[in-house]
Amino acid sequence: MSSLAGRVRFRPAWRRRPALPAALTDRLTPELGVTAGVAFVLAALAFYAQGGVANEPNTYAEVLLVAGGGLLGATALASPGRHARIAPLDGGWALGLFGVLALVTAFSIVWSVDPGTSWLETNRTFAYLAAFGGGVALVRL
């Protein structure tokens, strides 16, 4: 024979929470959230920026890329996760070579046939560099 060891609590039906399946809760991780967030931001930028020489949507997209990359870089520098030791910069070579490409793109304004368009492409390359640097910072976080 058995008996109850404790009190039985009654919860109304509207206060009961539906239980998530174990297969779903095992897959919901912070990494999945970050991945979904980055994918959403990149998809939104891809649909907003028109490409070509349309200045207004491209300018806003470039500003958002530079601001996001700077914010991620500042967060990576300020994070207390790796303060005990100096870790190697993962992706440092790729980031450095991308910086060299951005500098060559900037210097190409000097010998360009259409310097105005080269200036726009230089700004776009630096925005891509900032977004790539933000991705490297996100890996370090």
Image: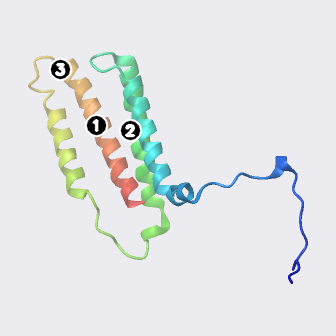
Mark number displayed over residue 66? 2
* Amino acid identity at mark 1: Phe
**Between marks 3 and 1, how big is the CA–CA gap?**
16 Å
Mark number displayed over residue 126? 1
Q: What residue lies at 51% left-to-right and 57% top-to-bottom?
A: 29
Q: Earlier in the sequence, mark 3 or mark 2?
A: 2
Q: What residue lies at 40% left-to-right and 30% top-to-bottom?
A: 45
* Amino acid identity at mark 2: Val
Tags 2 and 1 touching, CB below 8 Å:
yes
Mark number displayed over residue 33? none
Q: What residue lies at 10% left-to-right and 17% top-to-bottom?
A: 113
Task: Count residues near mark 1 (Cα–Cα under 10 Å), then give few for <14, some for 14-19, many for 20+.
Answer: many
Q: In the figure, is residue 134 to the left or right of 90?
A: right
**Between marks 3 and 2, how big is the CA–CA gap?**
22 Å
Q: Position of residue 66 (x, y in %)?
A: 38, 38
Which image quarter: residue 100?
A: top left
Find the residue positioned furthest to the bottom.
1
Q: Is residue 4 above or below residue 14?
A: below
